[in-house]
Image (spheres, helix red, strand yellow):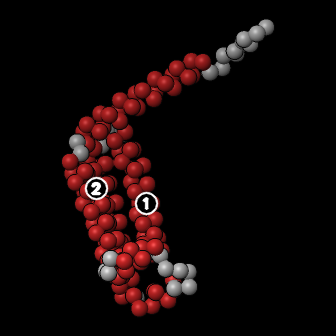
Amino acid sequence: MTISGWIFMISVGFNAAASVRVSNELGAGNPKSAAFSVIVVTMMSFIISVIAAVIVLCLRDYISYAFTEVGVPFGSLLGFKFGLGAKGIWGGMIGGTIMQTLILMWVTFRTDWNKEVKIAATVKRYVEEAKKRLNKWDGKKEEPLLS
């Protein structure tokens, strides 16, 4: 479970970077680049997860020794309670990762990226108007309420 957490953090880092990239691309009016960025990040996360899974499976007889002194994760209790053991734990994590990836891909392909660009342009316009209003008051000395 600890290794799974580490791998998850890699994906979270990719997703944070993708959020920035997609926002920048939408703000610049590039819907195709935004969609491509999401696809690249999803594929990279999936590839890294597969590589980590292969490494864990190849080293399954040795990795357990590194974690037996720090306690058994709560997930193993669930795996043994339902009689699935380690297969149930890993199967659940892999199933969840696959489901998350499929949902993300479905949302990515169903998103109207041109509409997202229009929304980003509207938000950008509102932010610029708010900045103008704030700059209007900047530098003026306020008079005390009570003199």
Q: Which residue is mark 2?
A: 104
Q: Position of residue 34 (x, y in %)?
A: 31, 48
The tag earlier along the polypeptide, 2 or 1, is 1
Whole-angstrom CA distance, mark 2 to mark 1, is 14 Å
Q: Residue at x 51, y 85 (%)?
A: 68
| Residue found 40% across the figure and 88% down from its top | 59
Q: Nearer the viewer, residue 9 or 80?
A: 80
Give the left or right position of residue 28, taking residue 136 as reference: left
Q: Quadrant of the N terminus?
A: bottom left
Nearest to the observer: residue 89 or residue 126: 89
Secondary element at tag 2:
helix
Percent from the top left, x then y, of residue 18?
A: 39, 54
Cβ atoms at labels 2 and 1 below 8 Å apart: no
- Callout 2 environment at 10 Å: few (<14), some (14 to 19), or many (20+)? some
Residue 100's tag is none
Is 30 located above or below residue 70 in the figure? above
Disc 1 marks a residue whose amino acid type is: Val
Q: Residue at x 79, y 8 (%)?
A: 147
Q: Secondary structure at mark 1?
A: helix
Q: Which residue is mark 1?
A: 12
Residue 115, located in which quarter of the rendered image? top left
